[in-house]
Each structure stands twice: as C-alpha cells, then as structure tokens.
Image (cartoon, grey):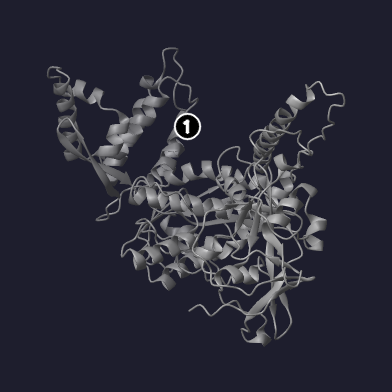
C-alpha cells in the first residue's frame, strides 16, 4: 500500500520545491509554451552542464520564483517528458539565433514526487529506513536516441538515518519499483553518456551483418538527417531577410555543429551492460528448457571468433537441443567429446530438480555404440544416471559416412546413390501416402485434368509435400542391411560408372566402410513404441484433410542451429565477455522463437523481455480475468548449480 506523500522540502543550493502531492492522472507529453511568470534562474550545476540553447526554455518551463521568498522552485505537478517550444511558422523579424531550431527534449525522472512510492535505504544497518526528497540531483545526463539526443534529470533522495543519498536513477532505486513503473525509465546509464533503450533493442537481433559498426552508421545517418532538417528550417527562415534591400542586412549565426556520436566500442559496452543487467533472467530462460528427445552435436566455426586473452582456448562448441529445436546447453570445450561430464551432470541435475521425466532418446553423430568387448559407449557412460536413455546415431551422419567412399560428389550418379541409400533406410507410411495421392487427384480434378496413372501422380507430388504430410519409419535391421548391401554391390559394379566409364565408388574404401558401419544399423532404427512425429495442424487439399507433421528424429535441427549460432557473434572476433553476452542473448531469443513456433506456428507479439511479459500476464489475469499472451510460459529460477549454458 502506498504511503502518504513525504512532507520534507526538496533543497538544491537554494532551490526548493513544494511538498509532494499525490500523483495526478496520466497526462500527454508536455510541450512547453511561454506563460507569464516571475523570472527564475537555473540551478548553478545545471547551468554548467546544459548547452546554452537548452537553458532558456528549460528555465522557463520547469522552474518559477516563489512570489513570497524569491527562491527557485519546481513547477507543480511535473511530468516525465518536456518538449521545447516550436519555432513560429512565419517570422516577421530575422531569427535572433538558431537555438529555437535545435532544442531537444528533457526527461525528468522523479518517482518519489510523482508517485509517492515508498522507497527505502538499501544499507543493511538502516533496516529499510524510508528515503525522503533532498532536492534535484546536480548532474544532467545526455542520452543517445535514434535520431538525436535528449537531456535527463532526476531527483535526489536521502536517508535520514545514515545520511546516504541516492539519485533516483540509480539501480538501488530502480530495483524497488514494480515493472509497470520501472519501464517508464527510458535509458541505460554509463559513465559519460547514456543510451536510450530503443537504440539497445536494435543491437539485440542477431542476424548476419548486424554489428555495432552497422548500427553506428545507421545512427550517423539518422542524426545527420535530423540535423540537416533543423538546419534547413533555420536557413529557410533566414533567407527572406538575407535578400532584403536593407542598408545593413542582418548577420546570422551559424547553426550549432552536429554533436559527435560515441564510438562503436561504446555501443558494444552498452549492449554488454544491458545483457548483464538481465543476466539472471536470461540464464533462467535458457535453463528452463527441457525435452523428451535430445540431440547433441558440436561445431568449431564459432570458436574461431574468440579474441584477446580467450583466443585459441576453445576448439569446439557443443550444443544439446530438443525436439522443438530449442537449445538446452551450449558449452565450449578444447576437444570434441572431451570434458563434457560436468555439462552432462548439470543437465541431469536440472531434470531432477525440476521434477521433469528424463529424456527417452538422445541422437548423436558419434560414440553411439561400441563393440561388446569394450563395454559402454562414451555418450552412454556420460549420461549413466539416465538408465533408460536410448542413444541413437543420427541417420544423416550415418549416410555421410558412405558418401566418403564416393570418388567425387560431382559424379553423375552421386545424387541417385544418396537418394537410394535413404530409401534403403526409410519407408513412407502407406496411409499418409494414400491420403496425399487422393488430395493430389482432387486438385487435378478441380483443374479439369483427366485421370492419370499412379506413377505419373507420384511425380506431381513434391518433396516438400511428402515431408510435410507423410511420416517415415525405418525398415528394421535385417531389411536395412540387405538393401544397403544390395545397393553397394550394384553401385560398386559396372552399373556404378558414368557415361565416361568413371566409377562412383572406391572399391576398397566402400567395402571397408560397409564392414565398419554394419554394427550401427541397429543404432539408426526408430525406438519401439515412441512417437517421433508431432501433429502441428492440417491442410485441406483437393477436398481431402491432410495432417501436417513435425519430425523429432535425428540431429539435423542442430545443424541448422549451427548456421545461426555463428551469426550470434557479429563480425570476425569478440572478447570473452562480449562473446558470452552475444551467445546468451542469442540462445534466449532462439529458444523463445522455437517455442512459440511449436505452439502456434506464428506469434504477432515479438518481445523477449520475460519480466515484462510476466508482469503483463499477471496483471491481465487479475484485471481482465484472462491472459493477453497465451504463449507466455513463466521461466524457472536460475540456481547457478553447474547449469552450463
């Protein structure tokens, strides 16, 4: 419950304000217009920090001289945003200066005075002693916005117990505000400059080429365009008087120079500060992901971007994903497959502490099984606590091992060989194929085409339609081995030569590969009784209702993720701190996109701030008795117990 307004006056070097009053109803942003009032002067420290063209309108808009005491006081009922007066549409006299054309807004942050929210001292000895108003903070911050700058001022708060003072924009004060009030504060503060949240958001999306250098150039263009517009407006107002036939034409002042932008390195530090401020939330979202079908794979391309002291300290990035394409764990190791026991222990602990059933299947690209004489495989031993976990070899990697025996992938028969190898392993569900054929026949009848043969009909069905509407299943160990052996024998004979007589396969190599890979045929078979396909929706084609499926088999989704993972870190190099900031932010956004795509297929609300979404969900359920964000899932709490991410 909010307390009554604080009664102490706000003192600032002879500047006082009236006692706080209850916060008024929300009002639109204020554009200051001149009014008749006693003259007032700006606080001395503000005068030293504000540029000359800002001082006059801020002095008249925010302050007034008390008629009784003559002391400077703040206008009653202050608001957050104050906008300078606009230049007149028509000038009857030459503009005295260009100042009115280049004024910028002011943001006034006064949570205690405006809302009367009880704020307390964070010192342990004070035992949550209430803070009171202590005037205006002497520092005025300059904040970088998308197309310009604005100034920001705040109030000073004091603890009467320990005499400690806090500016109202400090983290100690902002952390005490609820989400609805805190999000009204627009900027991230650094030592010299400050940065608006809208600029930081532009750095969060991790796509190819989205670097701080590119953002710096975009800001340069936006700022230059805004400055040019103001200069044109000023010069246009001056032009009629410059052409007049007066004996002494007026002398016009040059416009103020374009303010310099902070360098890209500063933008990068602001981005890292933003990620660090949300670090517990980001880690909690990453470590709140689970799955019943896991995939583990490694890549080394992204580790080449580590620079500085961290360069050459990691050789592989190992990732564990689930059936929806989300990433549960991402760790850097010196070598592939080694040093993963702490990661596995953290993953097992995560499932156990969350009370989630262990995964049933784990797809890998190596170490799936070993000869019986050698005991357990490395992967099985790493996840030994999950007794019922089935480790399977990814079929795409299994097929690529046979491709190593091909003399050249440019061979005329290479595509045919790989397609037939796939058919040796998979068969289509006959019911799904029948339904798709009926749908295709219905489409042909709707276009007025006559009946066609089944073979011609199959040629009209695209690979995309087969993948979307038809489920696949493996053929079993014996049938798969027989078909692959028959294919190898055929392609390793005269039938495996092109028109120039060049063979497709190297005889000795393919025979050795077949000997080595026979034991893996059991590893690529689908698990008994476990559904690998999820129904995501349905489509009506040719009058037939067709189901749409998503497959959880294999680690192909991780191969796609690795392409995007390399884009999470823009440019060609990053220090260890910036590398982790980019990686954490990228993983969190990737997981949320995959989750919402799995739930609804498409979601219009594109926001990744779980604190904001949680607050909105709680308030909407309380006020409206329903949720406005059906896709929101509250993340767990990050425990920090070896949950590698």
Front residue of this view, candidates 381 and 486? 381
Residue placed most toward the observer, 592 or 451: 592
Q: Residue at x 38, y 28 (%)?
A: 417
- The relative height of residue 302 versus residue 490 in the rendered view (above or below) is below
Residue 463, x across and y down, in percent:
31, 30
Q: Is residue 155 visible?
A: yes
Number of numbered markers: 1
For disc 1, the neighbor class at 10 Å (few under 14, some 14 to 19, many from 20) is many
Q: Is residue 184 left or right of residue 8?
A: left
**SS for callout 1:** loop
Left or right? Give the position of 499 relative to 434.
Answer: right
Q: Quadrant of residue 212?
A: top right
Where is residue 52 shown, x and y percent of the image?
A: 80, 49
Q: Please tell me which residue lies in front, 374 or 268.
A: 268
Position of residue 519 measured from the top left corner of the image (x, y, whole percent): 38, 48
Closer to us: 537 or 126: 126
Q: In the rendered view of the protein, which quadrant contains the C terminus?
A: bottom right
Residue that appears at 52% across and 43% down: 564
Residue 170 coordinates in the image, percent (x, y): 67, 67
Q: Indicate the quadrant where residue 630 lies.
A: bottom left
Q: Residue tagged by mark 1?
A: 405
Q: Residue furthest right?
A: 248
Q: Is residue 312 visible?
A: no
């Amino acid at each position: 419950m909010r307390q009554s307004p604080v009664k102490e006056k706000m003192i600032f070097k002879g500047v006082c304000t009236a006692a706080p009053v209850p916060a008024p109803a929300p009002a639109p942003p204020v554009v200051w217009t001149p009014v008749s009032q006693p003259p007032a002067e700006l606080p001395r420290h503000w005068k030293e920090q504000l540029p000359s063209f800002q001082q006059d309108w801020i002095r008249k808009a925010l302050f007034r001289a008390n008629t009784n005491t003559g002391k400077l006081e703040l206008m009653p009922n202050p608001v957050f945003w104050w906008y300078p007066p606009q230049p007149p549409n028509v000038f009857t006299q030459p503009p005295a200066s260009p100042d009115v054309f280049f004024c910028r807004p002011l943001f006034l942050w006064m949570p205690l005075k405006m809302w009367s929210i009880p704020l307390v001292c964070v010192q342990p000895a004070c035992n949550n002693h209430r803070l009171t108003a202590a005037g205006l903070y002497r520092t005025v911050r300059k904040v970088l916005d998308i197309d310009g700058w604005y100034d920001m001022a705040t109030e000073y708060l004091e603890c009467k117990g320990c005499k400690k003072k806090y500016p109202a924009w400090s983290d100690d004060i902002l952390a005490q505000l609820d989400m609805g009030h805190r999000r009204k504060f627009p900027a991230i503060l650094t030592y010299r400059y400050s940065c608006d949240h809208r600029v930081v958001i532009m750095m969060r999306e991790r796509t190819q080429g989205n670097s701080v250098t590119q953002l710096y150039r975009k800001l340069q263009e936006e700022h230059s365009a805004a400055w040019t517009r103001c200069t044109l407006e000023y010069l246009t107002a001056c032009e009629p008087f410059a052409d007049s036939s007066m004996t002494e034409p007026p002398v016009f002042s040059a416009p103020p120079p374009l303010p310099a932008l902070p360098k890209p390195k500063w933008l990068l530090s602001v981005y890292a500060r933003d990620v660090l401020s949300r670090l517990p939330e980001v880690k909690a979202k990453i470590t709140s992901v689970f799955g019943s079908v896991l995939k583990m794979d490694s890549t080394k391309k992204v580790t080449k971007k580590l620079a500085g002291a961290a360069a050459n300290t990691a050789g592989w990035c190992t990732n564990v994903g689930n059936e929806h394409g989300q990433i549960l764990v991402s760790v850097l190791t010196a070598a592939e497959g080694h040093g993963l026991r702490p990661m596995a222990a953290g993953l097992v602990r995560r499932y156990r502490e969350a009370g989630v059933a262990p995964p049933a299947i784990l797809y890998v690209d190596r170490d799936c099984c070993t000869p019986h004489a050698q005991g357990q495989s490395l992967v099985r031993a790493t996840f030994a606590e999950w007794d019922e976990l089935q480790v399977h070899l990814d079929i795409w990697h299994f097929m690529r091992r046979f491709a190593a025996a091909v003399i050249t992938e440019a061979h005329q028969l290479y595509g045919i060989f790989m397609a037939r190898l796939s058919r040796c392993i998979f068969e289509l569900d006959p019911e799904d194929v029948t339904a798709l054929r009926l749908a295709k026949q219905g489409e042909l009848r709707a276009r007025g085409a006559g009946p066609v043969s089944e073979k011609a009909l199959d040629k009209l069905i695209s690979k995309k339609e087969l993948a979307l509407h038809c489920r696949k299943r493996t053929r079993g160990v014996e049938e798969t081995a027989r078909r692959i052996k028959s294919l190898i024998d055929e392609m390793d004979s005269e039938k495996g030569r092109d028109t120039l007589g060049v063979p497709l396969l190297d005889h000795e190599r393919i025979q050795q590969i077949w000997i080595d890979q026979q034991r893996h045929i059991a590893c690529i078979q689908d698990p008994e009784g476990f559904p690998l396909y999820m129904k995501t929706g349905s489509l009506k084609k040719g009058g037939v209702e067709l189901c749409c499926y998503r497959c959880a088999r294999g680690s192909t989704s991780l191969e796609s993720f690795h392409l995007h993972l390399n884009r999470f870190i823009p440019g060609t190099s990053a220090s260890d701190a910036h590398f982790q900031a980019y990686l954490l932010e990228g993983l969190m956004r990737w997981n949320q996109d995959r989750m919402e795509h799995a739930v609804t297929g498409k979601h219009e609300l594109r926001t990744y701030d779980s604190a904001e979404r949680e607050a909105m969900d709680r308030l909407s359920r309380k006020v409206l008795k329903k949720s406005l964000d059906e896709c929101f899932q509250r993340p767990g709490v990050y425990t920090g117990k070896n949950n590698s991410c």
